Image (spheres, rainbow, N blue to C red):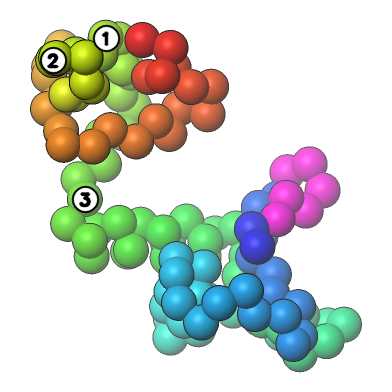
Amino acid sequence: CITAVGMETLGWYRYEGVVECETGIGMEMERMAARMGGTVKWPFNSSECLDADYFKIVADHLVSDAGVKPLLHTIVVEAIHEGGALAGVIVENKSGRSAVRAKRVIDCTGDADVAYL
């Protein structure tokens, strides 16, 4: 699981003997972090921990390896609807306003901004 530790830290913890599944994004992140030397031994059991800085590095690698081009510092301002289905979004950033058409739109705003539109 990905856990908030305290108020300011994001970390990765998998307690000894607990494996939710052998595949999936969590295990992929854990394996990549271990290959990069980004895990440390949890002092209370044999689990490995991934600190917040390595979490960001590993996530960036997984995103780029998947061929995803993230649009950082970009705001969704409108939804593109076609035939009652969501077909993309209109975004704004320092480059101006543009349309992003997609087969699937994943709302990662944290506040369901795209779903609201």
> Which stretch is magenta?
3-8
Specify whether residue 50 is in view: yes
Is 44 in front, or is 18? 18
Which quadrant does the N terminus fall into?
Answer: bottom right
Alpha carbon separation for disc pair 2 and 1: 13 Å
* Location of residue 71 with respect to 114 vertically, above or below: below
Question: Which quadrant would residue 20 be assigned to in this image?
Answer: bottom right
Report whether 75 appears left or right of 18. left
The Cα–Cα distance between marks 3 and 1, rounded to whole angstroms, is: 21 Å
Q: Nearer the viewer, mark 2 or mark 1?
A: 2
For discs 3 and 2, the disc positioned in front in the rendered view: 2
Residue 52 x/y as whole percent: 60, 58
Which residue in the structure is indicated by mark 2? Answer: 82
18 displayed left or right of 85: right
Disc 3 or 2, which lies upstream in sequence?
3
Instruction: Determine crowd level at label 3: few under 14, some 14-19, many 20+ residues with C-alpha closer than 10 A.
Output: few
Q: Would you say residue 4 sits in the magenta stretch?
A: yes
Where does label 3 land, which residue?
Answer: 68
In the rendered image, which residue does mark 1 sit on? 78
Which residue shows up at 31% across the image and 17% down it?
Answer: 76
**Would residue 54 be found to the left or right of residue 41 on screen?**
left
